Amino acid sequence: MGRIEKISIALPEEMLQSVKEAVDSGQYASTSEVIRDALRGWQLREPLRKAEIERLRKAWEEGLASGAAREYDLEEILSGARRRLEEMQRKSA
């Protein structure tokens, strides 16, 4: 882990209470352990979050590059799908 440096943090009352309860219940030996565990979780999630942001950015760019959106008539699409379904059902009967 390397050198350990002591820092000070400020927490909202609700978070501080949660940290104290975790220590008082014996779930953690110290407040430092609670914070270290929270940071380990953040370190595991952060690369996933960054990858998801990158995936969304690429999807956004692909959408922009695909050109302008077109209007579609939902009823026309549904009636076409119904016709094709009926046709398939007739052929398979």
Image: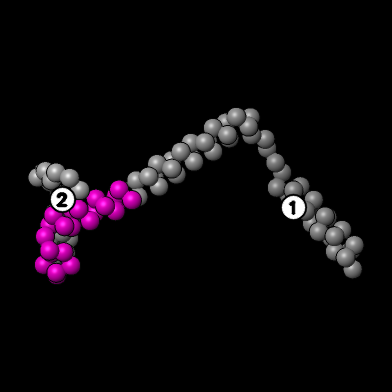
Quarter assignment of residue 62: top right
- Residue interval drawn in magenta: 23-44
Q: Position of residue 89 (x, y in %)?
A: 85, 64
Name the residue tied to disc 1.
Answer: 78
Nearest-to-viewer mark from 2 and 1: 2
Could you tell whether 2 is left or right of 50 in the image? left
Looking at the image, which is closer to me, 62 or 44? 44
Q: Position of residue 51 (x, y in %)?
A: 43, 43
Q: Main secondary structure of the magenta part?
A: helix
Q: Residue at x 9, y 45 (%)?
A: 6
Identity, as a three-letter code, of the amino acid under mark 1: Leu
Looking at the image, which is closer to me, 84 or 77? 84
Callout 2 touching callout 1 (CB < 8 Å): no
Q: Residue at x 29, y 49 (%)?
A: 42
Sequence order check, earlier mark of 2 and 1: 2
Q: Residue at x 89, y 68 (%)?
A: 93
Name the residue tied to disc 2.
Answer: 12
Residue 14 seen in this snapshot: no
Labelled disc at residue 4:
none
Outermost residue, front direction? 2
Identity, as a three-letter code, of the amino acid under mark 2: Pro
Looking at the image, which is closer to me, 2 or 86? 2
